[in-house]
Amino acid sequence: MIAADNPDRLCHRCRRSARSEVFGPPEVPESFWDHPVFASAFADRDMGALLAAYRHHPQHVNRITQDRMATWLGISQAQLSRYENGENPIDRMDRLRHFAAVLGIPPERLWFDRRGPAQPPQTGAGSAQDVLGAPWDAPSIARSAEETTRTDLAISRRAALGGVAAVAVGPALVEPLQHWLSPLQPLARWSGGTAISEDELTALRQVTDGLRDWGSRPGAGLARKAVLGQLNELAERLHRAPPGPTTERAFFAGAELSKVAATMSWDAGLHDTAQRYYVLAVRMAKAGRNDPFAAACLAGMARQMFDLGRPEDGLELVQLAQYGTRRTATPTLRAVLYTREAWAYAQMGRSQEFQRAVGMARECFAARDTVGEPHWLATFDEAELEGVLGARLRDLARHDPRQARYAEQHIQRALTLRHPSKLRNRVFDVIGLARTRVVTGEPEAACELIRGVLPTAVKLGSGRVLRRLQDFARESAGYRQLPAVRETLDAIRTLRSA
């Protein structure tokens, strides 16, 4: 019964219960988590499926909408929808822990964290926050590189994968990097060691060129420690070197090595480590007086954010790079940055801004002069431009399926232009083309493409290639009733377990 003086439709007790469900999940008994609705989500270790199962649990008194759960989790309804339907995998440790804590998932059921709730960031060397917070002067930058590589070399890859830390995101990532826009802090005194000679620089350049090439070969993980060892040795030398032109050029070589280390770490799934080396690359490029290369490293960091489902953070990094090189960027660098800007808009479904950024990228690319471009932009050729645009149109097709046929055209052109030696790039193109065929409702044709590229994927041993195959598996799962799709998904699962 509702009291005569109560103008509400609910009694006080019911209103209090409803309020608790609006502002937070209801209390549930231990048996709640034993219900069969959770079985496949726990078996597949899929947090997105777990969120969907929680919402549809039959024991809830009131229906839990996506809007309500998104409010509990502190995300948007659109983000929750992408998590639940598998568009964006939840692989960030901080987000997994946060969602588990909000919903009250029992600790013994957590497949990703046997250590309990998240701990405060450590203050020792080795985290992205440490590198981000270090002073922006040349000796401090050299010291950061030396300490980071020393710590990394002492940790086995298995241990690193077992204790993956959360990447820095949002203001914690972008605001410290804004120091890159300011002049390098001047020092009245620096080390009195001997200057780096031209012969040393020549030898360093040869080693750096060789290690950079290893990053795109099959089995590149074997080269990662070689890159870290060279970077550690260089950082020790820079820590003792006096200021001067050769020291600045050595810092730039260190920036190139750091970027290679970041790419290798990202490929291995070590996102926190990759971010740390990207930050080091930006800082060392700053000490090397090479702002355009620092901008290219920021573009690499933006790609990592896109990979993690953080397009807003990626866009801020790209805009920071664009502003910092507004007077110094070459046409090719401008084209690269515009493609990264388009990448963010595609993920966010902002078609008009996407088309504008693509138009600017094409205009800048057409104005390039290959003779005047730096060597580290040589890989951004017409094939790469077409491949990037095709993949981004595929991203946009999630919001506007009409874009899928344009994505296919660009990816086909990229495959035509790619040199046969670019194995990993070609594999990415084929997987992208297959994912586009899924969008256009051609799952069997998509699976034929995937089966053709699986032997090369096995040979490459690339973590990023495997993750793109997993994306394909998730997106094509709705066609699992087709024999060709089941066979292809089983082959991908076998590759993943291997």
Image (cartoon, rainbow, N blue to C red):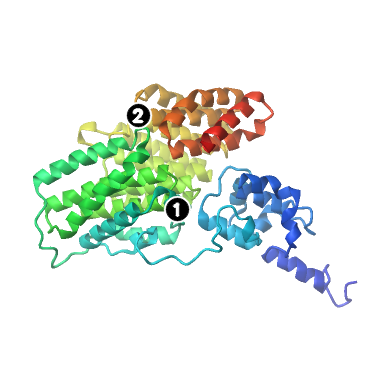
Structural distance between the alpha carbons of marks 1 and 2: 27 Å
Count of numbered circles in the view: 2
Asked whether residue 167 is in view, the answer is: yes
Res. 448 mark: none
Nearer to us in this view, 141 or 72: 141
Q: Is residue 263 above or below residue 473?
A: below
Secondary structure beneath label 2: helix
Secondary structure beneath label 1: helix
Residue 33, horizontal then vertical, whole percent? 72, 56
Residue 194, horizontal then vertical, whole percent? 9, 56
Q: Is residue 143 above or below residue 209?
A: below
Question: Mark 1 or mark 2: which comes first in sequence?
Answer: 1
Query: Mark 2 is on which residue type?
Result: Glu
Residue farthest toward the bottom in the current orientation of the protein? 5
Nearer to us in this view, 406 or 466: 466
Query: Mark 1 is on which residue type?
Result: Asp
User: Could you classify mark 2 by the number of other residues whose Cα lies within 10 Å: few (under 14), some (14-19), or many (20 or more)?
Assistant: some
Residue drawn at (38%, 46%) of the image: 265
Contact between marks 1 and 2 (CB within 8 A): the answer is no
Q: Which residue is mark 2?
A: 382
Q: Is residue 136 above or below residue 427?
A: below
Residue drawn at (57%, 25%) of the image: 447
Residue 174, horizontal then vertical, whole percent? 39, 58
Residue 7 lies left or right of residue 179; in this view the side is right
Nearer to us in this view, 156 or 41: 156
Residue 324 lies left or right of residue 107; in this view the side is left
Res. 313 mark: 1
* Image quadrant containing the N terminus: bottom right
Asked whether residue 442 is in view, the answer is: no
Residue 355, horizontal then vertical, whole percent? 46, 38
User: Could you classify mark 1 by the number of other residues whose Cα lies within 10 Å: few (under 14), some (14-19), or many (20 or more)?
Assistant: many
Residue drawn at (39%, 52%) of the image: 273
